Amino acid sequence: MVCPLYLREMRRKPETILFWKVGNIYAERNEWDLAMKHYNEALELSKTFENIKIPEIYRGIGRVKWRNGDFSTAIDYFDKTSKRVFIEIKP
């Protein structure tokens, strides 16, 4: 289940969705370098979102790191994923 606030933020930057989905396609094709390139671009674009972290991008990066044998870094990214979407509510 994806948080509605997350979707609202993603729609503000549709290229973030594009890079994330293309990363997923490359990951499914076992083209890990290209997947990582697109996940990193999506992560960079997502930094402009206000008060939201993007767990799906972290999951993709963790998957690439795991497949490349970088288990420690992969676990760090999977841990970020497990923390769900963080939303900071400002008064």
Image (cartoon, rainbow, N blue to C red):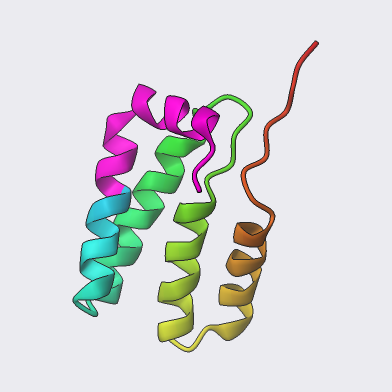
User: Among all residues in the image, which is located at the extreme front?
Assistant: 1
Does residue 4 show up magenta in the picture? yes
- Taking the image as shown, residue 83 lies to the left or right of residue 45, namely right
- Taking the image as shown, residue 24 lies to the left or right of residue 43, namely left
Main secondary structure found in the magenta portion: helix
**Residue 32 quadrant:** bottom left
**Front position in the image: 52 or 45:** 52
Q: Position of residue 7 (x, y in %)?
A: 44, 32
66 vs 34: above or below = below
Q: Position of residue 46 (x, y in %)?
A: 46, 37
Report the residue at 65% width, 61% height from top: 82
User: Among all residues in the image, which is located at the extreme bottom?
Assistant: 69
44 vs 29: above or below = above
Q: How many marks?
A: 0
* Image: magenta residue range: 1-19
Does residue 26 show up magenta in the picture? no
**Front position in the image: 7 or 49:** 7
42 vs 30: above or below = above
Q: Position of residue 85 (x, y in %)?
A: 62, 43
**Residue 76 quadrant:** bottom right
Report the residue at 64% width, 58% height from top: 80
**Front position in the image: 37 or 85:** 85
